[in-house]
Image (cartoon, coloured by chain):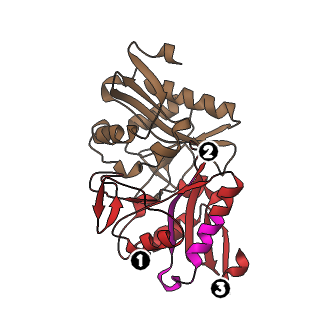
Chain colours: A brown, B red
Amino acid sequence: MNQKLPNGLKMRNSEPSDHQKIINVLKEWWGGRDLTWMLPKLFLIHFNNTSFVIEKRDELIAFLIGFLSPARPKEGYIHFAGVHPDYRGIGIGGLLYNRFFKICKENGRDTIRACTSPVNKGSIEFHKKIGFNVLKGNAEIGGIQVTLDYNKPNDPKVLF
Amino acid sequence: MNQKLPNGLKMRNSEPSDHQKIINVLKEWWGGRDLTWMLPKLFLIHFNNTSFVIEKRDELIAFLIGFLSPARPKEGYIHFAGVHPDYRGIGIGGLLYNRFFKICKENGRDTIRACTSPVNKGSIEFHKKIGFNVLKGNAEIGGIQVTLDYNKPNDPKVLF
C-alpha cells in the first residue's frame, strides 16, 4: 500500500503516543467542531492492530481508528478517521480505508460499518464514493437518512 | 454466577437496546456528573460478548462494559461500570467484575485494566478492594497517583 502514497508520506500502525497528536489537530481538521470526546485514549491503546496513521516526517497527515467487532464476527467498524485539510482529495483517506478493508477481508469480515454526522457533507460524500451505502434511519436531514438521538439526545447520525 | 445475585436480580449479556437505558441513568448514578460522552453506542453494539447488565425485571440495576484488547493479547479492559445507588455495597459490582475476570482468564488475559477519575472516591475504593493496583502516574491528587490530561486537557485519571 505504501508505494501508492505521495512522496514523503508513510503509513504505519497507530501507537498510544499518537493520541495526543490526533487530539491536537481534531478541531482544526473538523472545521472548528470539538470532537475530543470521540477519542478517549483507550482507542489508541487497544485497537492499534487495526488502526493506522499517515505521517510526513513527524507531522500527522491522516489517521484511521478501526477495529474488528468482537461481538459481531462478520463486521469491522471504523470509529474515526481524518485527513489533514491540505492533503484532501488526493486519495489518502482511500488508502487508509483500503488498508482496513484488507484486514477485514483477511479476517472474514464482509460488513464494514461507519457513522458520521449529517453536518459533515464531505464525510458523507467520501463514504458514498468509496462504496458505503447509507442505512435507512428514522428521519431525514438535508435529503440524507439519519438516526436521531444516536449517541445522546440531539445527536443525529448517518450510519453506513 | 447468577445464584449469588440477590433474589429477583438477573445478569445477562448487554444488548444494543441497553444503550438508552444506561444513558438514562448515568447522571443520577454518577451524582450529577454527565458522562454520556463516555459511552457512544458502539460500545453496546460491538462488545456485548464481554459486557453485562443486571436487571430487576426490566429495571437496570448495574452494568459493566468491557472488552478483550484486540491489540494487547494478554489484556482485558473495563471501560465503564456502574451500580444503581440503592443497590451498592452488596457485592453486585463484584459479581460483574468476576464475570469479566472469568472471561479474561478463559482467554489467556492475565492483566485487566481500568480507569477512573480521582473525584470518584467510591470507584477508587471499589477497585482497590477487588484487587486492582493503582498505577504510578505523573502527579498526585488527594494522595492518589494520577495521570494528568489523560483523555483531554484537564482530565486527570487514576489508572489501574
Query: Pointer 1: what residue?
Result: B28
Density class for disc 2 (Cα within 10 Å; few <14, some 14-19, many ≥20) is some
Query: Pointer 3: what residue?
Result: B6
Q: What residue span does the magenta drawing correspond to?
A: B76-100
Q: Look at the picture and state if A148 lies above or below A54.
A: below
Q: Along the polypeptide, which appears first: circle 2 or circle 3?
A: 3
Amino acid residing under circle 2: Pro
SS at mark 1? helix
- Give the Cα distance between marks 1 and 3: 22 Å
**Which residue lies at the image location 30% right of the left edge and 24% below the top edge?**
A86
Query: Pointer 2: what residue?
Result: B73
**The N terminus of chain A: image quadrant:** top right
Q: Are labels 2 and 1 assigned to the same chain?
A: yes
Residue A123 lies in quadrant:
top left
Q: Position of residue B9 (x, y in %)?
A: 65, 81
Q: Look at the picture and state if A1 lies above or below B87.
A: above
Q: Are marks 2 and 3 in contact (CB under 8 Å)?
A: no
SS at mark 2? loop
Amino acid residing under circle 3: Pro
